[in-house]
Amino acid sequence: MSSSPRSVHYDALETREAAAREAALMAMLPTQVARAQASTDAFRDAFVGIDATRITNRAALATLPVTRKHELLERQQALRAADARERFGGFSAIAIGPDMPRLFASPGPIYEPEGTARDYWRVARALYAAGMRRGDLLHNCFSYHFVPAGSMMESGAHALGCTVFAGGTGQTEQQVRAIADLKPHGYVGTPSFLRIILEKAVELGTPLPSLKRALVSGEAFPPSLRDWLADRGIAGYQCYATADLGLIAYETEAREGLVVDEQIVVEIVRPGTGDPVPDGEVGEVVVTTFNPDYPLVRFGTGDLSAILPGACPTGRTAPRIRGWLGRADQTTKIRGMFVHPGQVAAITRRFPEVLRARLVVSGAMADDRMTLRVESASAAEGLATRIGEAVREITKLRGDVELLPPGSLPNDGRVIEDARDYR
């Protein structure tokens, strides 16, 4: 095991001036947009008429359409039906062969390519922040089957100079035996499975004192579980990554939010739209990567989060997000009709007086009541009536309108709240 310091930053990128980082990322945007247009059919179609040379700042980036996961899935399914050789819906810039050593599937199924770049998923940075170092042995309990999670962690560990034991999932007693025999320093996998392993070790009377660090992901990591691990001598950290994008953000020793990866641009947008929200407001996480093989530009994760103010106390200067705060897809069926966040956004765009809105569905089964709660600095005469007319026109449903003063609605990213009584 390496004796290298565990508090040093992964590289100089993490501590550069925030303005320098922003300038560098914005300077890379035109090339990535042009690459996506030139090398993928999907973005060639999505960015028709877009001059990539003009996408040089966040305001310009926000004019591009957001591609959401369901659209990626629908395009993959449609193109596969037309051409069995098309696996990725026109989003991949690389083809089956030596440039794509592996491909994976995530629920849908959505198929994702893996290129040949070192640390392709950019996970080494998160492993480093969790305390893993060159020469460490890591016990990898993410799945190696279908999904890329196991490969994501393994490729990052290899880039860091670590050796990996491919534990995978399940077979708890064998996991305990392997950890006892091989004495790895670190664990990567879901936090719940680490707890299961440790509890099984107690049941078997097999101590596992070598485990000191853990990088967990794939599910919630509440403070109670973090403290439970700490009581057993394991410092657990979490990261936020997806099969489409790789690493998005990671936790540090400060335990104050998740630091955004150095090689992506993160925007927080109002659910159902591509409109960025002010820092601090909860919205959907939208990511632009600079991956040349799978050049996703403004890809909507469907996850909710918010930007935290200030820089990380560890000296890392990248933006921080609060972590996973729920799902952005709040589409709800009301009186037999589907209503989605984009419709709520379409309503509010018609009225400059409206600051924020939240559609609340209440009542009992088969007795739905719909109320659009609206924050407005001005309660102009007839405003509620006009908004109600827009509600009916856009959703095809009648609903009440409640005008509220600014700041009345919770900052939780909810655009549609289902408060019905299903008992």
Image (tube, rainbow, N blue to C red):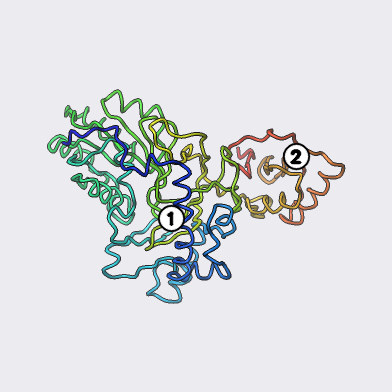
Which residue is disc 1 drawn over?
289
Spot occupied by residue 390 in the image (x, y as percentages of width and height) = 77, 53
Up the image or down, 176 lies above or below 347; here it is above
Element assignment for label 2: strand
Image height of 268 relative to 94, above or below: above
Q: Which mark is residue 376?
A: 2
Q: Quadrant of the N terminus?
A: top left
Image quadrant where one finds the C terminus: top right
For this rendering, which residue is in front, 174 or 137? 137
Q: Position of residue 321 (x, y in %)?
A: 48, 39
In the image, is 158 to the left or to the right of 385?
Answer: left
- Residue type, mark 1 in image: Thr
Q: Position of residue 110 (x, y in %)?
A: 41, 60
Can residue 361 be seen? no
**Quick check: 146 left or right of 298?**
left
349 left or right of 284?
right
Crowd band around label 2 with a 10 angstrom C-alpha radius: few (<14), some (14–19), many (20+): many
Could one spot residue 36 in this view of the protein?
yes
Label pair 2/1, CB-CB below 8 angstroms: no
